[in-house]
Structures are given as structure tokens and as C-alpha cells.
Image (tube, rainbow, N blue to C red):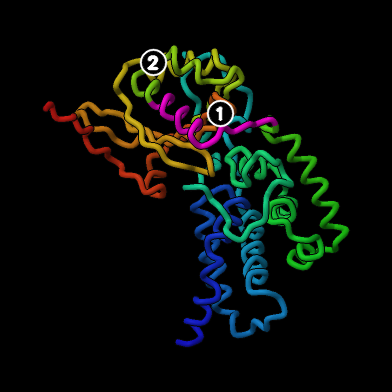
Amino acid sequence: MRYDEEFARLADPFRPELLVHCYRMLGSMHDAEDLVQETYLRAWRSYGSFEGRSSLRFWLYRIATSACLTALGHRSRRLLPSGLGAASDDPDEPLALAPGTDWVWPLPGRGVDPMAADPAAIIASRGSVRLALIAALQHLPSRQRAVLILRDVLAWRAVEVADLLGMSTASVNSALQRARARLEHVAPTEDNLVEPDEPAQRLLLDQFMAAFESADMDVLLQLLRHDVVMEMPPHATWFYGRDAVGRFIEAKVLAVPGVFRSVRTTANGQPALATYARDRDGVHRAHALQVLTVSGSQVSRIVSFLAPALFAGFGLPLILAPARIPAIS
């Protein structure tokens, strides 16, 4: 019993950051949770032979990273729709599905590593769990991905990464250079992303919610940046530009006012909306989780996950309680 208690006391504090680390590697919270469970099971079984030559944190990262690399060797790369093909400019075409595609899924909350270093080495203005970055990381070969995350996100020294991955320091540096070059090539253009302060972001989110719920396309279009992108996993179809996105939303999403209600939440450290659609019985049921990228005073990216199963992980109900009508005094 002492053995179990000691292991839990020493190892459990690292669980949140290991979960985020595995999520960066895998692009799926569900997969990350499975791999963290596997990591702790392996670590518990081997704890008696842990000699303390490295820190417990380093040892756990070694096990977790190895588990991720093994898992990635047997799984397809996760994507967002923009990684599959060109954008559509015809909102009247049926949305296309891509059977068998593994999608990048969102991370509930801000995904902050309490012990992680400043991730400014990747992109100063971008958090290390931003959805676009997670999607871009999935384009890297698994070992390059691990090197870049450990070096540029967690700010580990090259010699530490070499020890963890069983590589030479020169090989780590070479892999990091290739990973950075590849990331720059595949990452969406968010280098000039300027996020507003919290009050301004909240105001923008309130305006977006109100316009979406009332189907006010004039206001909604004003809130979209000229080069806005809209993606809707599991549909492969996506749209680029205010005109195309606006025409699709008006024709296929907000054709009738009052259908949707929204709840604020946070995903990947970004503002997000959980949207509920009114059914024929008048009940609002879980419809989509919209993760928004905000640049300045406008929305530059909408990733609308049409997957009600995600709501539970965000602590959100599947059915929204009826709106309260203020009493008339």
C-alpha cells in the first residue's frame, strides 16, 4: 500500500501536463487520455526499479513520449478539412464526407501546462495548444514532432531531448531544423495574429453570439475577417473568404432565425461556442462546438465540430434548459 501511495503522491501532479503533451502529439483528447493511462500503468509497474538517476518528471515524459511514438506508428495522421484539399466556393453543393479520415479534435479549456515553459519559440503570438498549431504538428513525422514539442514548446535542452529519445544531440538539432521548416510550410498564416484583450474579446464573442442566434447576417459579416476560413469536421468541405463563408452560413446554417442558442466555453485556449439547435419538439439539443480564432476585432477562423459527443468533455449538457423569461413587474 505504501508503494502505491508513494507513487500516486509523487506522480499524479504531472498528469495534467502529460495529458496536454500527449494531446499535442496525437491531436485527440480521447487518444491522449488513453496514452496517459498507459503511461501511468507502465510507470507504476516499473516504479520499483526507478533509481532516481533522472527526475520523475523526465522519466514519465520518456514513457509517455515512447507510448505516443508507438501509437503514431499504427495510426493515420489526424487532419482538419483544410488539410485535405482546396476550399469550396459553392455553398449550394452538398457537404462532402471523407470516410475513414481521422480528425484533429479540440482540447477542453485553456490547456495550460502549469510546469511548461513559455512557448514563444514557436510563434510568439500563438499559444502552444492553439487548434491550428495542433493541426499543423500532425503534418510532421512523429519523431520530428516529438523533438519540436520538447524543444520549442517545453524548452528542453537538446541534450535532454537526445537522452529522452535515444538520439544524438546532432540528430536532435537536425530534426528540429527540419521540423521548424516543415511547420512553417504547413502552418496556417497566423504569424500576424493579434488577439484582443479579454474585455474586447468577450465583447466580440457576445456580438458574434447575438448575430448568430438572431441570424443577423449584416452584423455577422462585419465580424468576419476578409480571409476568414470555416471548417466543419467531419465534413471535408470548407470555405475561404468572407464572401464564400457568408453565403454558406446564410444559405445553409442561418436560413431561419431563432433556431440556435449558444453557450460560451473555451477550447485550445481559444474562445468557443457550444451551439444548440432547436428540434421539431422545441427542445434545443447539442449541435456543434465552434472554436474561433480572433484577430484584432474580427473572427479569422471558425472550426465548427459537428460532434455532439464532444459536449460531455467540456462539461456541457446535451439538452439546453429552456430560456428564462423575465417576470413583468
Around disc 2, counting alpha carbons within 10 Å, would you say few (fewer than 14), some (14 to 19), or many (20 or more)? Answer: some
Nearer the camera: disc 2 or disc 1: 2
**In the image, is residue 196 part of the stretch drawn in magenta?**
yes
Question: Few, some or many C-alpha atoms within 10 Å of disc 1 (few <14, some 14-19, many ≥20)?
Answer: many
By secondary structure, the bulk of the magenta-drawn segment is best described as: helix
Q: Please state which of residues 292 and 75 is positioned toward the viewer in this rendering.
A: 292
Residue 223: x percent and y percent? 50, 20
Outermost residue toward the left in this view: 329
Q: Amino acid at mark 1?
A: Arg
Would residue 96 be found to the left or right of residue 308 on screen?
Answer: right
Q: Is residue 234 visible?
A: no
Measuring from the top left, give residue 170's x and y in whole percent. Answer: 88, 58
Q: What amino acid is labelled 2 in the image? A: Asp
Quadrant of the image occupied by residue 11: bottom right
Image vertical order of residue 226 relative to residue 5, above or below:
above
List x then y, in percent, for residue 294: 55, 30
For the point 61% across and 20% down, the residue is 227
The secondary structure type at the circle numbered 2 is loop
Count the marks.
2
Taking the image as drawn, is residue 262 in sight? yes
Magenta residues? 192-209
Q: Secondary structure at mark 1?
A: strand
Residue 4 is marked as none
Place of residue 50 in the rendered image (x, y in percent of width and height, measured from the top left):
64, 81
Q: Residue furthest toward the front?
A: 329
When the figure is inspected, residue 42 is found, relative to residue 179, above or below; the finding is: below
Distance from Cα at disc 2 to Cα at disc 1? 19 Å
State the residue at coordinates (30%, 42%): 318
> What's the mark number on residue 301?
1
Is 185 above or below relative to 19? Answer: above
Name the residue beneath numbered marker 2: 216
Let me know if residue 2 is in the magenta part. Answer: no
